Image (cartoon, coloured by chain):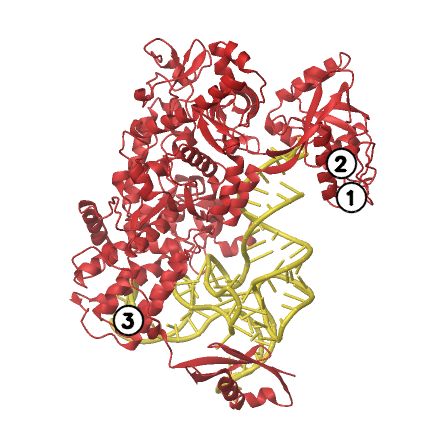
Amino acid sequence: MEYNHREIEPKWQQRWKEERTYNVDIDKTRPKFYVLDMFPYPSGAGLHVGHPLGYIASDIFSRYKRLCGFNVLHPMGYDAYGLPAEQYAIQTGQHPEVTTTQNINRYRSQLDKIGFCYDWDREIRTCDPEYYKWTQWAFMQMFNSYYSYDTKSARPISELIEHFEKEGSKSLNVACSKELDFTADEWKAMDEKQKSDTLMNYRIAYLGNTMVNWCPKLGTVLANDEVSEGVSIRGGYPVEQKLMYQWCLRVSAYAQRLLDGLETIDWTDSLKETQRNWIGRSEGAEMRFKIADSDVELEIFTTRADTVFGVTFMVLAPESAYVDQITTPEQKQAVEEYVAATKRKTERERMIDKKVTGVFTGAYAINPLNGKKIPVWVSDYVLAGYGTGAIMAVPAHDSRDYAFAKHFDLPIIPLIEGADVSEESYDAKEGIVCNSSSDLLDLNGLTVKEAIAATKKRIEELGIGKVKVNFRLRDAIFSRQRYWGEPFPVYYKEGIPTLMDESQLPLLLPEVDKFLPTESGEPPLGRAANWRTPQGYQIELNTMPGFAGSSAYYLRYMDPRNNDALVSKEADEYWRNVDLYIGGTEHATGHLIYSRFWNKFLYDLGLVCEDEPFRKLINQGMIQGRSNFVYRIKDTNTFVSAGLKDQYDVTPIHVDVNIVSNDVLDLDKFRAWRPEFRDAEFILEDGKYVCGWAVEKMSKSMFNVVNPDDIVDRYGADTLRLYEMFLGPLEQSKPWDTNGIDGVNRFIKKLWALFYKGDTCLVDDSEPTKENLKSLHKLIKKVTGDIETFSFNTSVAAFMICVNELSQQKCHSRLVLEQLLVLLAPFAPHVTEELWHSAVGKDTTICDAQWPKHNEDYLKEDSVNYAVSFNGKARFNIQMPAGSTNEEVERTALAHEGAAKWLEGKTITKVIVVPNKIINIVVK
RNA sequence: GCCCGAAUGGUGGAAUGGUAGACACGAGGGACUUAAAAUCCCUUGGCCAUUGCGGCCAUGUGGGUUCGAUUCCCACUUCGGGUACCA
């Protein structure tokens, strides 16, 4: 029998499917292990060889854990709601569901060819009503909850209503959009609408007037993580700031827990750091400044309370509510013009345009600690969304304030001894404070740290401020003005947003004639006929964002067909949370924050038993493309080989990597590739046309996309799997280069040759030799260690070494070869399964074998090789019997004939013996 | 600007304090073959020596710690990723 992947791979894939080899159920007699891939958005382009990298790694780990005796949950599904399908629908009129289903089918057939051990019975799709019922349901729970800082958890909104009825807003310690102040009587006197509005201030899923990222081109709002550098991540369209009435999730309430939880999970430090920065905790103080000749008090936030004596002006964000309250009539026009001008600018323009701008309000604030009058300005360098939207400016010690002060010629008062602020501000939080004393507070002589603490203490005593922790993390905007998403189970009863009954879930996405906004500017659902409750109330027209469906999908896999609960208690308590999660870093500040938030919320409600969803997380690196170039001599149809291109004036042109092999261009295929190249002439080197190359993103436009289907067809899935792992460390980005694939393919053929020569099966029952066992046990030890640390590339190398050794040893012993197959099974499931049955003669699947353990006895050496070094430089080797003492090693080394040369005329200062490795003799 | 990570042959990479370059690709040479493919064997970081041994230099640059540094520390250079008026 010859190795023929085209025959054995489909055969086993079929058998696994028929025999339900990879389907799992709760089994309390075995420990569970949950391995999850970030589920893909099924794009129209299909998979390229970069996509399966993480899937292969997780598949290897799943199979390994199963062989180790774990009951492994390893599911897959699709993140099926999304913008590309909708935009395609707008262009073509094709229903997004149709394209999505097509894409899913394509993905599935591509995935199937690679031989993954997914339990496909547990497949989920976020656009499936059976699935999104629970997305809608979770939203309803959030609507019905508020967040208590006393219990540090979400609580039913009914508790809050009880509190209002007893005490109004008194002694509340809860998350809210803004601090409200009302009595129990005032609450009771409110009408339904007022009560609804008041409760919105506290709900975890709430409707709020917030500054949103509005993308006019996409016609929708976007969350902060969907925007980068002022443009939308999808499409790259400009985004502007706009005040809109939108559904939001009070993620900010969980900021501290999201931060603390990072300590308990096994993620890389860099990813945790990214999340910490995104959450952006900063400790500081809120302080109130009275406005002269007015009742208004400006509340500001600062982390540098110590610099309060250096405040020479105040600045408001243009959107701040204070602006209208304090602007003097003389300045009114100038301020209004400035605010209007800022509004017109998109966020991107505001970012690119780093010019200092601002306008004086005409008002003055009083510094509460020294009574000084300080002017209040408006400028767009202060953000409305952070802190209180107002700052005290200390130009001597903040570079932004410094630039503003220089531009408008405002005074600068240095507060730290020795700080030179003539050219730039002194921003460092260190030094000894000076120029900082008044009747109320004296900071002179203190360090900055001490001064911050002293000021905080004093302002609390004086009742002019309080210690405050601020977070950068914003609430998530949860409405999208799109069609292809989950509808909100909400209707408007006399203008009051009201939840539907749980029994009405799932609320199905209605049909529409077009996927565009209505003529009156309403979202596409405005086109749905009868988008009303039976009582005739209007149902919410927005849909939920992409992250809604992906925030709790890992829970649904535990119990995917349950129609009575998101996940049953039994399934949740058995599978608990994800033990290993593999996916890209691009979700660090989006999905991985939202999921943690969502899970913590469900945890507060007692619906899930683990506080963190993903115990360990590995980020696989990106596989980049490796593009090839041909060089056309300018204004001709002649192409010059890469080595000679410097002699001509050439234009590099991308050429399809699939017609290039080892950087050598196939001339006939090139001529056939494009009509304009049909008559191409070539200047060759050594009779070949050599292409240039560069590492770029894998994309159609670069002609560097490699389809896994082609690789599987040519070399087989096992070769693809091994090669992707062999390419380099899992977490590192690296270019795909098909050139090296022959090496792993040869390895599989060599493996095959251990079992078969022609049609003869070589496996016999001979007793393994010492050498055989040594090679095998070396491999067991290495591979086990490597899988546990995700060093799959070095394990593949170890397999190659072992197979080479065994073939040199002519080892055909069944006992050795069957264990070799088990070790290799996670990496190359098809060929190992085939040999396991046909050559070794087993009749159960290799998946149910047992992972072998290595035996140190077989690894022991009779003698040990020591490298003898003089002053750290290795000079010769000596063989020592195993277990020799350091003294014996040293004596032998010095007595060795080679030693004399290096000892001549020198004296020995020191001898270091590293057991089993090296002996270093220091001479002078 | 700030934070994080990386830099090793022609190429992908190995070695986390102990003989740098495992393993693989590519390249060169050889065997088998009428020939090719496939397979197998040898060489392959650089320089010097090559009649034999051998010697020197080398992990981005410069310092440091150490008997010994690709590995640890400091500074710099370059590249990649994240983030950005967050007060």
Give residue A807's mark.
Answer: 3
- Please tell me whether mark 3 or mark 1 is closer to you in this view: 1
Colour used to depict chain B in the structure image: yellow
Q: Quadrant of the C terminus of chain A?
A: bottom right
Q: Secondary structure at mark 3?
A: helix
Give the residue type that dot 3 points to.
Ser
Q: Secondary structure at mark 2?
A: helix
Say few, some or many: other residues with alpha carbon within 10 Å of mark 2 (under 14 / 14 to 19 / 20 or more). Answer: many
Residue at the (47%, 50%) spot, across then down: A733
Q: Calculate the distance from the C-alpha at mark 3 to the C-alpha at mark 1.
A: 76 Å
Q: Is residue A545 left or right of residue A417?
A: left
- Please tell me whether mark 1 or mark 2 is closer to you in this view: 1
Q: Is residue A324 left or right of residue A811?
A: right
Residue at the (36%, 23%) spot, across then down: A92
Colour used to depict chain A in the structure image: red
Give residue A307's mark.
Answer: 2
Give residue A446's mark.
Answer: 1
Q: Earlier in the sequence, mark 3 or mark 2?
A: 2
Q: Quadrant of the N terminus of chain A?
A: bottom left
